[in-house]
Each structure stands twice: as C-alpha cells, then as structure tokens.
Amino acid sequence: MQTVARWLADRDPHTFPYESVVREYHRVGKHFVNKELLSDLDKARAGLTDQTAGTGPLAPFLDAALDKYDGRYDYLTYIGVLLLPLPSRGTSAEDVTEALRRRDRLVSLLVTDALRFELAAIDNGPTFLPQMPPDDRIVAKRCRLGLRVTNVMLDRIGAGPSLTREEPVRATCYQCDAVAADSSAAERIALRLSMLPVYVIHDEYLFIRVLQSFEATFALLVTQLGAAVRALCGGDPLTAALLLDAARTALHESAPLFSLLATMRVESFRLFRQFTDGASAIQSENYKAMESLCRRPDAERLNSLAYHSVRVIRRRILEEPSPNLQDTYLAAVAEDRITPAQAQALDMAMNRFATVLGRWKVTHYHLASRMLGDATTGTGASEGTPYLRKVAQMPVFTHPGAQK
Ligand code: HEM
C-alpha cells in the first residue's frame, strides 16, 4: 500500500510498483483487496493522461484491478483480456498465418505458466493461492494434459523442446525453462499482470489460464472465419473451404484444454465461484463474433441474454452487419457464382467445422454440469446448465444440407 502511495508523488508510469500490487492481490484475492489500496489505485488511474494511458500496461492493468471497486467486474476484466497479446491484436485481419502463430505462442505461454504454477506448488509448497493445493498425482495429470495442448503448438512455432519420450513432470520442467528462456519481457509482464484471481484457492490459477487460452483460440477463429467470408465474397470458395478447415483444426487442437480444466476439484471451484458472480464467458465477444460469422443469430437469440451480454457485437449485427458465411454461401449458389463441386466442397467444410464446434458445446455443457451440480444459475445470470443444453442443440448453420 505504501509503495503505491509513494509512487503517487511523482506518477512515472515506468516505475509503477506492479510487483507489490500483484503480490498483495495474490495474498488476499481480488475480492478482498484493502479499500485504501484500491483508493490509491483509483488515484493512479485518475492521473493517467492520454499519453501515459497509451503506453505500457498500466491502463489495462488498472482496468482489470479496479473492476470490483468500480462495480463493473465481468468476464473481460476477470481474464484481463486487454492485457493479453491476442491473435487479433496487432495483426492485419488478412494475415491468418500470423494470427495462428500468435495464438500458438500465447496458448503455449499461458498453459506452460499454469503448469509452472502447479510444479511450484509441489516443489516448494504453495507460493500464493495456498488453499486446497494439489497432490503429486493431480499435478502429474495436469502436466500430461497440458503438454498435450502445447506440443503441437510449440512444434509449429519451432519453440519447443522435443519431449515426447520424457515422463510428463520432467518434460514439463524442461518446457517451463525453454518457454521462459524464449519469452520476451513484454510477454512475461502480460502473464504476470493478467493473473488476478478473486480468492486464494490454488485451482483458480488453472481456471483463469484455461479461459484465457480458449479466448485466444476464439480470437483466432474470428480472423480465420472473417478471411473465409472475404474469400467467398471475392469468388474463391476453395480458399474459403481451406480457411474453414484451418479454423476447425484450431478449435479441435484446443479441446484438450477441457480435459485439463476437468482436473479442477469441484470443491475448489465452488469455493472461489462465490466471488466470481457477474463474470461469465457468456460475455466473451470473440465467441459471439465467431458464432455470428457463421450465420446471423436468430432474432430470439439476438434479443436474449446471449447477445445482450455482448452489446458491442449485438450493435454491430443490428446496425452495421457484415457478411456471414451462410448468407454468402447461399447467395453464391443462388447467383450461380460457384460450381456444384465448389459448393459441395464448401458445404462439407462448413459441416466439419459445425461438428467440432458442436462437440465443443457438448463438452462444455458436461463439464459445467459436473462443476455446478444442482446450482441453478450461472455467473452470467442465465438459468445455468439448461441454457447450455439448449445452446448445445442450436445448429451452427441452418441452410439446406447443413448438419443438424
Ligand atoms: C468450471 C467450468 C465452467 C462452468 C461451470 C461454466 C458454466 C457456464 C454457464 C453456466 C454458462 C451460461 C451463462 C452463465 O454464466 O450464466 C456458460 C457460458 C459460456 N461458457 Fe462456460 N463454464 C465453464 C468453463 C468454460 C470455459 C473453459 C470456457 C472457454 C472459454 C467457457 C466458455 C463459455 C462460453 C463461450 C459461454 C457462452 C455460451 C453461449 O452464450 O452460447 N466456459 N458457462
């Protein structure tokens, strides 16, 4: 607290005491941070000029750190979305190769960091978030599942050690060293500042890293599906089909993240969930942007909590709609702009993507049901698992020939 108060005297954004603030948040959990510290952070934010706000992570960090204090805590601030180098940031919408590289790199960093936290808990005893630490067996399982997510990504970006023959805990130790050595200062800061759990339960660390990893993948899918729509509009249906297949692969590769998250203890989840009310991935803009690039949501869904929770996306669909895959495909067929063979290739690619997204929704529903048990409401104010069951049954595409 004193370090922030001292910093307020000269307010140089380059010397902001991030480390002390993060340590205090980790000591008590975001929900229980002392009012005096919050008020000093609020003063720090009030002193940000446009110039200082535009440079460095101070503005996005304070945005995430002060969400509960301001009464605007939500999913985006919970996972510190503005602090993450998401694939869609700093990349041209056309550059799907660069977006994939950024997703691979970010997910590798996030998952490796989650595993590093696991290993630290069994090596030295809990460093922070001391409640309900994992045992050796759980950590070994997390290492095995985490490596399953990162192996393919690290291979693709050429940043990973080849570890397939090692047993998972030892392999994870090597991977932590290799990834840390390869990461930039900016990436290390992004990792450190984007971890502000609401309480002091060990497993919340894994929960946040998995949410962030999925968010990175959704952001990649938005880039890939957006490029597919443009290819189709531009008369290149086969490139559109290839991009759809790339999106399907990217989503498929992230599926083991659910297995990793399923190692979270139900009792742990229920404890920290008491303080996450108001933050739900129903507020994920990337997820809804991805969904609405497939087809325009039905009026009922657009006017429900699903889209009222993502106002920016909803407004865009209503006020400045951009082309989506299904409408563009139907128009191309109706106007004879694509051959029957091309239409079939595209149709099959759409169905393959729909299958993987459908599987994602069903897995999500099962995991949520196990974690929530009889709890009837979600943290995003929906009716909870009945909402998810309904969403899982909702078709990704509805054109004739689409898989139902
Ligand atoms: C403990 C694990 C999880 C539980 C208990 C859970 C629970 C829920 C619930 C109840 C909802 C409905 C909205 C509400 O909160 O009221 C929801 C929505 C959603 N969740 Fe999860 N979830 C979990 C993990 C995840 C993960 C890892 C992701 C990946 C980002 C995710 C992504 C989503 C998305 C995108 C929605 C919105 C779906 C839509 O509106 O169609 N969830 N979740």
Image: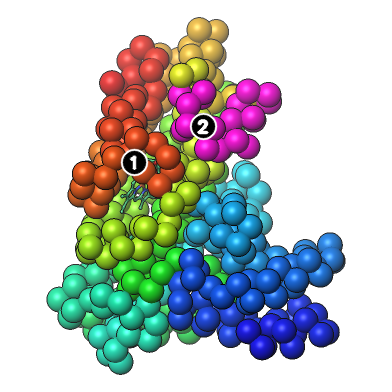
Q: How is the image coloured?
A: rainbow
Tell whether position 40 is magenta.
Answer: no
Percent position (x, y) of residue 280? 44, 48
Quadrant housing the C terminus: top left
User: Measuring 39% from the left and 36% from the top, which residue is drawn there?
Assistant: 382
User: Measuring 63% from the left and 23% from the top, which residue is drawn there?
Assistant: 318
Query: Front-most of 202 and 239?
Result: 202
The answer as to whether callout 1 falls within 8 Å of ligand 1 is yes
Task: Determine which quarter of the picture holds residue 376.
Answer: top left
* Secondary structure state at the residue bearing disc 1: loop
Task: Determine which quarter of the picture holds residue 152.
Answer: bottom left
User: Measuring 34% from the left and 35% from the top, which residue is drawn there?
Assistant: 383
Asked whether residue 140 is in view, the answer is no
Residue type pointed to by label 2: Tyr
**Magenta segment boundaries in residue numbering:** 301-320
Query: Front-most of 391 and 240?
Result: 391
In space, the residues marked 2 and 1 are separated at their CA atoms by: 17 Å
Give the label on residue 307, or none: 2
